[in-house]
Amino acid sequence: MLVERTEDGGYGAWIPDLPGCVALGSTYDEVIAEMVEAVRLHLDGLRADGLPIPAPTTIASTAIDAA
């Protein structure tokens, strides 16, 4: 999952392996909670449509807090 600050001070998140699965939140904790729900709904939708769940492609991550 990728999370970034938005211009209005909130947060946006998305998962490259799940195109279209995105979330917005006013705080970091809120965007994480919204993303958990978005992933659940996205995977439920793929299953309901009989589509495969993509395998993860990311093998590592690094978080840098430049604040």
Image: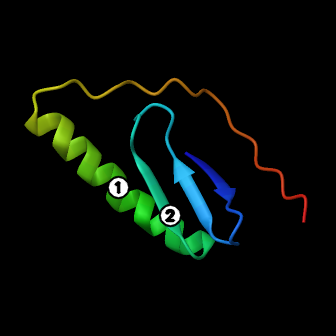
In the displayed structure image, the side of residue 53 where residue 48 appears, left or right = left
In the shown orientation, is residue 47 left or right of residue 67?
Answer: left
Q: Position of residue 6 (x, y in %)?
A: 67, 62
Quarter that holds the C terminus = bottom right
Total label count? 2
Between label 1 and label 2, give the one nearer the viewer.
2
Q: Residue at x 35, y 50 (%)?
A: 39
Which residue of the protein is positioned furthest toward the right in this rendering?
66
* Residue named by callout 1: 38
Where is residue 33 drawn, in percent x and y?
44, 68
Which label's residue is closer to the chain start, 1 or 2?
Answer: 2
Give, as a three-letter code, the residue at label 1.
Ala
Residue that appears at 45% across and 31% down? 17
Badge 2 crowding class, 10 Å Cα cut-off, few under 14, some 14 to 19, many 20 or more, is many
SS for dot 2: strand
Where is residue 52? Give x, y as percent: 22, 24
**Residue that numbered label 2 is attached to:** 24
Real-space Cα distance between discs 1 and 2? 10 Å
- The answer to which image quadrant residue 29 occupies is bottom right
Residue under the image location 61 percent in, 64 percent down: 11
